[in-house]
Image (tube, coloured by chain):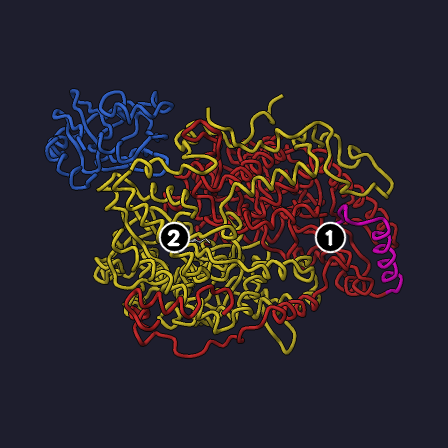
Chain colours: A yellow, B blue, C red
Amino acid sequence: MSKDTREPLIFDVSRPGRVAANLLPKCDVPYQSPSELLGAESLREKLPLPEVSELDVVRHFTHLSQRNYSIDAGFYPLGSCTMKYNPKINEKTAGLPGFAALHPLQPQETVQGALELIYELQKMLAEICGMKATTLQPSAGAHGELLAMMMVQAYHAERGDTQRNIVVIPDSAHGTNPASAARCGFKVKGIPSNEKGCTDLAGLEKALEGGNVAALMLTNPNTVGLFESDIQQICQMVHDAGGLVYCDGANMNAMLGLTRPGDMGFDVMHFNLHKTFSTPHGGGGPGCGAVSVQANLEPYLPVPTVEKEGDTFRWKFDNSKSVGKVHSFYGAFLIAVRAYTYILSLGKEGLRSASENALINANYIRARLADYYDVAYNAPICMHEVVFSANRQKREGDVRAMDISKRLMDYGFHPPTNYFPLIVPEALMIEPTETESKQTIDSFIEAMIAIAKETQENPEIVRTAPHTTLVSRLDETMAVKNLDLRYAPLFEE
Amino acid sequence: MAQNIPADLKYTKSHEWVRVEGDVVVIGITDHAQDSLGDIVYLDLPEAGRVLAKEDTFGEVESVKAVSELYSPVSGEVVEANTGIQDSTEVVNTDPYEGGWLIKVRLSDPSEVEALLSAEEYGAVADAEGH
Amino acid sequence: MAYISNTNEDRAEMLSAMGFTSFDALLAPLPPAIRYQGELNIPTALDEGGVLRRLQQLAAKNVDLESHLCFLGAGIYDHFRPVVVGMLAVRGEFATAYTPYQPEVSQGTLQAIYEYQTLICGLTNMDISNASMYDGATGLAEAALMATSILNRGDIVVSGAVNPLYRQVIQTYANVTGYRVVEVPTAEGVTDTERLSEIVNSQTACVVFQQPNFFGNLEDVETLTETAHKAGALAISAVDPISLGLLKPPGDYGVDIVLGEGQSLGNAMGFGGPLLGFFACNKRFVRSFPGRIVGATQDSQGRRGYTMTLRTREQDIRREKATSNICTNQALLALCATIYLCELGKTGLRHVADLSLQKAHYAFQQLCAIEGVKPLFPNAKFFKEFALSLPVSPSELNTSLLQSKIVGGLDLGAYYPEFAGSSLFCVTETKTKAGIDALVSATEGVVKGGKA
Ligand SMILES: Cc1ncc(COP(=O)(O)O)c(C=O)c1O
């Protein structure tokens, strides 16, 4: 029998009558019966919440935390996610009461420091990408994409160009690109990548025919980790056809201080502050998908925008061309505080150095593993990430990219991204980031080489990995077929 | 990898198979299709009575990590859908050509069947996609 | 350089291992015309102490609500955050992990999400909860879009008593998709149910309301839900999760989709972000549902484990046909909500809700005793927020209150011109009787001072 290593659910720990701590004051105003104040018919009977002590809570969540892999614990080369070190000072500044304990509807004169920070960060981001203006309202990359497509639509509508209902997206794009365009009512037209893994100009030309294209959504560097060297021509082609060009800026970590999407010809882009600007990913979020625009799209930015008059900052709500609002308030302010802290810590020289080291680390991995794994599209140089294909391992040992990823766990590393981009069979997408040392990267490379050898000598050990984690591979078919999405006993009785 | 491609059926490039039973055809997905999808966990099938044109989508088949649309190889009216297997979708994996059939369609243009791929032609399609 | 681990020697060695002598070789793919030659107009690096000082200086320009009393609500609430919540959630093992795509090394995050889903289902009495949405407003917009696609109908009917900021977001989302947003008027501070029954028809995809509504008042949720269902539409309710410590859960009155802002469940107000959209629905809609969801299953040795499931709804697999474009969500805030709900538990949440109810009613009664201050909606029942018509201008009152270290209520005229001259006050359990009395006497002072 295998050892049962599971952490009980907090509901299993619960005991009737147990309470956590003396959290709340006694009622110090005259007590009135809730059923009189609210009406007995409005009140609930059961409240199925756990009853646990504070020590139960601390132990439980400490145990859960120990069941996670994290950047703080080890190398996390998850491609497209920029899992760089998240500086601790960011948490300190975001926790200052002068930021954390602000209500979004306080009078503007009481939040001048917050508005100044937003204003400053927006300017910095616009400078970094070479555009005119920025909004921090979107909550994540996908939300930024959606907002950008809304602005694209408003732009064409104002010009009476309402027939433009197509958004062109390369087949290498992240799934959020087509999903965001479709959410905005656009039809998605895919274009294939060329033999170099980049945008196929002839394919683009053809897609642009007919005058119905509203925009091209392009990731640069693209999801194969390659810089789109024809980018200026691509932007020109789309502009000539009357369309706009959107940059998925998830890969901005390759470009800080080295090149700017605005200078390439892009009209609009999103940043992932939760990637490039080191705000922690939190096991899935939160993020901030700040969007920057050139002058042509500035009028359509969501409201409110922040303005500076003399030394005073204020919200501007009335903007007749704005697409409206995409967030309850102004976006993820405390994420903005972290990103701003980070930019001040790095300075302009540190930003550039971050991208330089990101490129060096990725290319070093590419060079050292090229004999063991097939480099996708075999370009001589990659940007901040490198995509391999496990095709060779699949052929030689019936070992898939997923198997290699699982085996890496046994060597103490987080796996790379698998099965993305879709155009690379058996993709292993590796993004080391700039914060890792040569020493760490060397040990990762050794592990990858050892696994490549195992696929030849003992493929079974790779195919059945991981062997050292708290749970082994999970039955995902069972998870879908016998849906268990909440702890059922709580809802019985 | 050996492919099971019965010689007496007709096929499409999108991996459906067709068996003619008088003026009705039975339609399913091929062994190759079920194998590349993996464990099938969900089937979306049309209601009887729906009229399909050739190449219309008539449903969806899903595994844990992939979705595939189903395209009608022929034109006609759906006379029956194999709703009985919607709770035991693994039948499509284990028995794609018999128990795992998906819909029956009354042909509106029997000549369409002739234009479909033979087992041999389909085998070439499946091979080209590789394994 | 900050946070760079490689030394100059490391870099030189790495470049030479690749056969290069300088970093510039790696920029070969960049056409010279777009290589950035300038220096970014961004300050040069500050030392850690310098960074802290700059941020402290900015923070000090704000009036923070630890040093001031806050009577603002309207969607973001000053509820007590038990210390343990922040202490646990800041652990790097939670905070610096990515989305749990690799379940074997993410069981902590996954189990926490499963517990979160269970807690949200318990609070709302709904069948399924997702792992989170961006915030209450986008959650509401997604719910409305979900209804349009389930029913293939184009009208989104929204009560005028739904948070006006949320309504702006729904409108923004609807504009680009061509759906029509139809507003239901209010009467005496609640949705006008008679008008609603005239408005709904066979084009209505959903009826959206909020409980308690924007004015803090209790809606006749049974009738609203019934009216939606009679028209074949879905009933969608935004709820205040704290109120569910006392109020009947939406599952009890048959709502189809429930969502809300989860900030008050142990998360900072943070000037309005990041926030936590919670989202739950009836299990009939499990395939139309937006966002990530975690399920329990077994590993290859039969041990219980958790994994993301129903993945084919999502953008990375279904792309333009996905149920939503959401990818990154608000996982860490959902974790805080989970810890919060466990820490407070059954009795604690009820107590928070009850204290808020008691204090709000005490404040209401004391304020209404001031001459000229009148309830805006005298017949309404309310939870922790209430609207008062004032004999002085709300913004002037607020300016004066600031001198007593009080952040007053929301000037309703900014959102409802017909209610100019009225304020929306919020009182939570964090306000003591003394604090409320301070608000009352400061208000009385301004009113008696005769300023208008
Ligand atoms: C290339 C790319 N585009 C877009 C996104 C979406 O960003 P987010 O997860 O912040 O919504 C991601 C990240 O997952 C990405 O890698």
Residue type at the position of mark 1: Leu
Establish whether labels 2 and 1 are both on one chain.
no
Residue A186 location (% of width, % of height): 37, 53
Q: Nearer the viewer, residue A220 or A216?
A: A220
Residue B74 location (% of width, % of height): 19, 32
Choose top left, top right, bottom left or bottom right for residue C125.
Answer: top right
Residue bearing mark 2: A444
Q: Residue at x 39, y 72 (%)?
A: A258
Give the magenta part as a residue range: C424-450
Report crowding for label 1: few under 14, some 14 to 19, many 20 or more residues within 10 A (C-alpha): many
Residue C233 location (% of width, % of height): 51, 36
Q: Is residue C448 magenta?
A: yes
Q: Residue at x 44, y 38 (%)?
A: A468
Q: Nearer the viewer, residue C20 or A143?
A: C20
Left or right of A311? Residue A279 is left
Q: Residue at x 47, y 46 (%)?
A: C99
Residue type at the position of mark 2: Phe
